[in-house]
Amino acid sequence: MSRSSIILFAALLLIATLAGCQQNAEHLALESTKISENQLHQLLLERQRILEGIAEDAKRWVDAGRMTASEHAALKKAALLAGLDLCETRAERIEIREEVVRLDRQAEAWIERRAASGRAGEGERDQARLTRIESEIGLLRELLNKKGKHDKK
Protein backbone atom coordinates (compact mmCIF):
# COMPACT_ATOMS: atom_id res chain seq x y z
CA MET A 1 0.00 0.00 0.00
CA SER A 2 1.41 3.36 -0.96
CA ARG A 3 1.86 6.15 1.55
CA SER A 4 -0.92 8.25 -0.06
CA SER A 5 -3.30 5.24 0.09
CA ILE A 6 -2.53 4.77 3.78
CA ILE A 7 -3.16 8.47 4.46
CA LEU A 8 -6.38 8.37 2.45
CA PHE A 9 -7.50 5.21 4.29
CA ALA A 10 -6.65 6.78 7.67
CA ALA A 11 -8.52 9.96 6.74
CA LEU A 12 -11.60 7.98 5.68
CA LEU A 13 -11.43 5.92 8.88
CA LEU A 14 -11.16 9.10 10.94
CA ILE A 15 -14.13 10.66 9.11
CA ALA A 16 -16.23 7.53 9.62
CA THR A 17 -15.29 7.41 13.31
CA LEU A 18 -16.12 11.08 13.80
CA ALA A 19 -19.44 10.67 12.00
CA GLY A 20 -20.28 7.72 14.23
CA CYS A 21 -19.33 9.71 17.33
CA GLN A 22 -21.49 12.62 16.19
CA GLN A 23 -24.47 10.35 15.59
CA ASN A 24 -23.95 8.75 19.00
CA ALA A 25 -23.72 12.18 20.64
CA GLU A 26 -26.91 13.30 18.87
CA HIS A 27 -28.67 10.10 19.97
CA LEU A 28 -27.54 10.61 23.57
CA ALA A 29 -28.67 14.24 23.47
CA LEU A 30 -32.12 13.16 22.21
CA GLU A 31 -32.38 10.52 24.93
CA SER A 32 -31.31 13.06 27.54
CA THR A 33 -33.98 15.48 26.30
CA LYS A 34 -36.62 12.75 26.48
CA ILE A 35 -35.52 11.85 30.00
CA SER A 36 -35.64 15.51 31.06
CA GLU A 37 -39.05 16.03 29.44
CA ASN A 38 -40.37 12.90 31.15
CA GLN A 39 -38.99 14.03 34.50
CA LEU A 40 -40.56 17.45 34.03
CA HIS A 41 -43.89 15.91 33.09
CA GLN A 42 -43.81 13.66 36.16
CA LEU A 43 -43.04 16.62 38.43
CA LEU A 44 -45.85 18.65 36.86
CA LEU A 45 -48.26 15.76 37.46
CA GLU A 46 -47.11 15.39 41.05
CA ARG A 47 -47.53 19.12 41.67
CA GLN A 48 -51.06 19.05 40.30
CA ARG A 49 -52.01 15.97 42.38
CA ILE A 50 -50.69 17.60 45.56
CA LEU A 51 -52.54 20.85 44.90
CA GLU A 52 -55.75 18.95 44.15
CA GLY A 53 -55.35 17.05 47.43
CA ILE A 54 -54.82 20.26 49.36
CA ALA A 55 -57.92 21.80 47.75
CA GLU A 56 -59.96 18.70 48.59
CA ASP A 57 -58.82 18.82 52.23
CA ALA A 58 -59.62 22.52 52.32
CA LYS A 59 -63.21 21.79 51.29
CA ARG A 60 -63.63 19.91 54.57
CA TRP A 61 -62.09 22.86 56.43
CA VAL A 62 -64.69 25.16 54.86
CA ASP A 63 -67.45 22.78 55.92
CA ALA A 64 -66.02 22.82 59.46
CA GLY A 65 -65.81 26.63 59.49
CA ARG A 66 -62.00 26.68 59.65
CA MET A 67 -61.53 28.28 56.21
CA THR A 68 -63.49 30.71 54.06
CA ALA A 69 -65.00 29.79 50.72
CA SER A 70 -62.78 32.41 49.13
CA GLU A 71 -59.63 30.78 50.51
CA HIS A 72 -60.83 27.41 49.27
CA ALA A 73 -61.50 28.87 45.82
CA ALA A 74 -57.92 30.18 45.73
CA LEU A 75 -56.55 26.71 46.51
CA LYS A 76 -58.80 25.11 43.90
CA LYS A 77 -57.70 27.76 41.42
CA ALA A 78 -54.02 26.95 42.08
CA ALA A 79 -54.70 23.29 41.30
CA LEU A 80 -56.48 24.22 38.08
CA LEU A 81 -53.72 26.58 36.96
CA ALA A 82 -51.14 23.86 37.61
CA GLY A 83 -53.05 21.82 35.04
CA LEU A 84 -52.31 24.40 32.35
CA ASP A 85 -48.74 23.10 32.14
CA LEU A 86 -50.08 19.64 31.36
CA CYS A 87 -52.50 20.66 28.61
CA GLU A 88 -51.75 19.44 25.13
CA THR A 89 -54.36 21.45 23.26
CA ARG A 90 -55.74 24.94 23.22
CA ALA A 91 -59.23 23.57 23.96
CA GLU A 92 -57.96 22.01 27.20
CA ARG A 93 -56.38 25.31 28.26
CA ILE A 94 -59.57 27.21 27.45
CA GLU A 95 -61.62 24.77 29.53
CA ILE A 96 -59.34 25.31 32.53
CA ARG A 97 -59.38 29.09 32.08
CA GLU A 98 -63.21 29.04 31.95
CA GLU A 99 -63.34 27.05 35.19
CA VAL A 100 -60.96 29.54 36.84
CA VAL A 101 -63.20 32.44 35.77
CA ARG A 102 -66.24 30.60 37.24
CA LEU A 103 -64.41 30.14 40.55
CA ASP A 104 -63.34 33.77 40.70
CA ARG A 105 -66.86 34.98 39.89
CA GLN A 106 -68.22 32.83 42.72
CA ALA A 107 -65.60 34.18 45.12
CA GLU A 108 -66.36 37.74 44.05
CA ALA A 109 -70.09 37.18 44.62
CA TRP A 110 -69.35 35.72 48.04
CA ILE A 111 -67.26 38.79 48.96
CA GLU A 112 -70.01 41.08 47.64
CA ARG A 113 -72.54 39.37 49.94
CA ARG A 114 -70.16 39.75 52.88
CA ALA A 115 -69.62 43.43 52.03
CA ALA A 116 -73.38 44.01 51.80
CA SER A 117 -73.74 42.64 55.32
CA GLY A 118 -70.83 44.73 56.59
CA ARG A 119 -68.44 41.79 57.10
CA ALA A 120 -66.06 42.68 54.25
CA GLY A 121 -64.45 45.97 53.39
CA GLU A 122 -63.92 47.85 50.17
CA GLY A 123 -60.37 46.46 49.90
CA GLU A 124 -61.63 42.88 49.87
CA ARG A 125 -64.19 43.77 47.22
CA ASP A 126 -61.51 45.41 45.08
CA GLN A 127 -59.19 42.42 45.47
CA ALA A 128 -61.93 39.97 44.50
CA ARG A 129 -62.84 42.10 41.49
CA LEU A 130 -59.19 42.37 40.45
CA THR A 131 -58.70 38.60 40.78
CA ARG A 132 -61.76 37.94 38.61
CA ILE A 133 -60.59 40.47 36.01
CA GLU A 134 -57.14 38.83 35.85
CA SER A 135 -58.79 35.46 35.26
CA GLU A 136 -60.97 36.86 32.51
CA ILE A 137 -57.90 38.43 30.89
CA GLY A 138 -56.20 35.02 30.93
CA LEU A 139 -59.24 33.43 29.30
CA LEU A 140 -59.53 36.11 26.64
CA ARG A 141 -55.82 35.84 25.83
CA GLU A 142 -56.22 32.10 25.43
CA LEU A 143 -59.26 32.59 23.18
CA LEU A 144 -57.40 35.16 21.08
CA ASN A 145 -54.37 32.89 20.74
CA LYS A 146 -55.50 31.27 17.49
CA LYS A 147 -52.22 29.54 16.90
CA GLY A 148 -52.26 27.38 20.02
CA LYS A 149 -48.49 27.40 20.41
CA HIS A 150 -48.59 24.52 22.89
CA ASP A 151 -50.72 22.26 20.70
CA LYS A 152 -48.95 19.09 19.64
CA LYS A 153 -48.79 18.51 15.93
Image: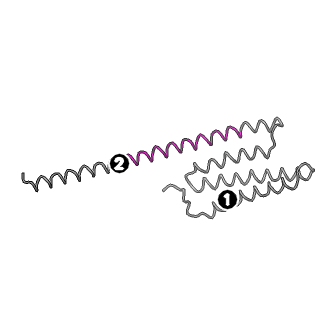
Q: Is residue 129 magenta?
A: no
Q: Quadrant of residue 126?
A: bottom right
Horizontal and vertical percent for residue 15?
Answer: 23, 53
Q: Which residue is mark 1?
A: 139
Q: Is residue 30 left or right of residue 105?
A: left
Q: Which residue is mark 2?
A: 25
Q: Could you classify mark 1 by the number of other residues whose Cα lies within 10 Å: few (under 14), some (14-19), or many (20 or more)?
A: many
- Mark 2 and mark 1 residues within 8 Å of each other at the beta carbon: no
Q: Quadrant of residue 75?
A: top right
Label 2 and label 1: CA atoms lie apart by 42 Å
Q: Residue sitting at 40 percent across and 48 percent down?
A: 29
Q: Quadrant of residue 133?
A: bottom right
Q: Residue sitting at 79 percent across and 51 percent down?
A: 106
Callout 2 secondary element: helix
Horizontal and vertical percent for residue 64?
Answer: 82, 35
Magenta region, residue range:
26-55
Q: Is residue 32 magenta?
A: yes
Q: Amino acid at mark 1?
A: Leu
* Predominant SS along the magenta part: helix
> Which of these two is toward me, 69 or 28?
28
Q: Amino acid at mark 2?
A: Ala
Which residue of the protein is positioned furthest toward the right in this rendering?
A: 118
Above or below for 18 versus 149: above
Callout 1 secondary element: helix
Horizontal and vertical percent for residue 38?
Answer: 49, 43
N-term mark: 2 or 1: 2
Q: Could you classify mark 2 by the number of other residues whose Cα lies within 10 Å: few (under 14), some (14-19), or many (20 or more)?
A: few
- The tag on residue 8 is none
